[in-house]
Image (tube, rainbow, N blue to C red):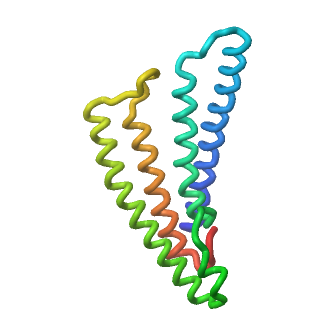
Amino acid sequence: MAIKGLEGLHKGLRVAVVIFYSIATVLTTINAISRYVFRYVIFGSEELCSYSILLVAFLMFPIIEAKNGHLRIDIFDTVSKNEKLKKIVYIIRGIFTMGICGTLVFYGWRVTMVAYRYKSASNVLKIPKDILFGVTTLCFVFAIIGWLCILIFNKRRPL
């Protein structure tokens, strides 16, 4: 049940990633054509593209973590043939990752609250930064939830 919910969450994150990546791609293409053909720059397009790509990176983080697709040093996987050792290393890596993500959630929440309190906004489009910081912090929460589901409910390796 929990794994199915996690897979549903990942499906929603993938849809959001496709939307933000499409926005960045289309806007960059239109802006490049507009700039070179019509000598006109679309106001705020670079900022919107930057934020879209940033969100793509953070929204993909929980999915990559759950699929075991992140960069890592896999010396234990290549050197050791002992499945029990590999599983112990996998569990330790999950706990360590949850600790790092927990720290990032703590400080991300603080930064989000400061941005909210001071009504911080982006330079050109005046996008509230607390929303951007909140979404990135929420992605670390999703990564923690993913690792908990994998370590507690999923007896096999990654999803």
Q: Residue at x 71, y 15 (%)?
A: 36
Quarter of the figure that contains the C terminus: bottom right
Q: Residue at x 59, y 57 (%)?
A: 63
Up-down relation of residue 141 to residue 98 (above or below):
above
Q: Residue at x 32, y 44 (%)?
A: 111
Of 118 and 36, which appears nearest the observer? 36
Of 6 and 28, which appears nearest the observer? 28
Of 13 and 81, which appears nearest the observer? 81
Up-down relation of residue 60 to residue 127 (above or below):
below
- Horizontal and vertical percent for residue 123? 41, 24
Quarter of the figure that contains the N terminus: bottom right
Up-down relation of residue 111 to residue 33 (above or below):
below
Side (left or right) of 4 relative to 97: right
Side (left or right) of 141 relative to 18: left
Q: Residue at x 66, y 9 (%)?
A: 39
Q: How many marks?
A: 0
**Quadrant in the picture for residue 43:** top right
- Horizontal and vertical percent for residue 79? 64, 84
- Horizontal and vertical percent for residue 8? 60, 56
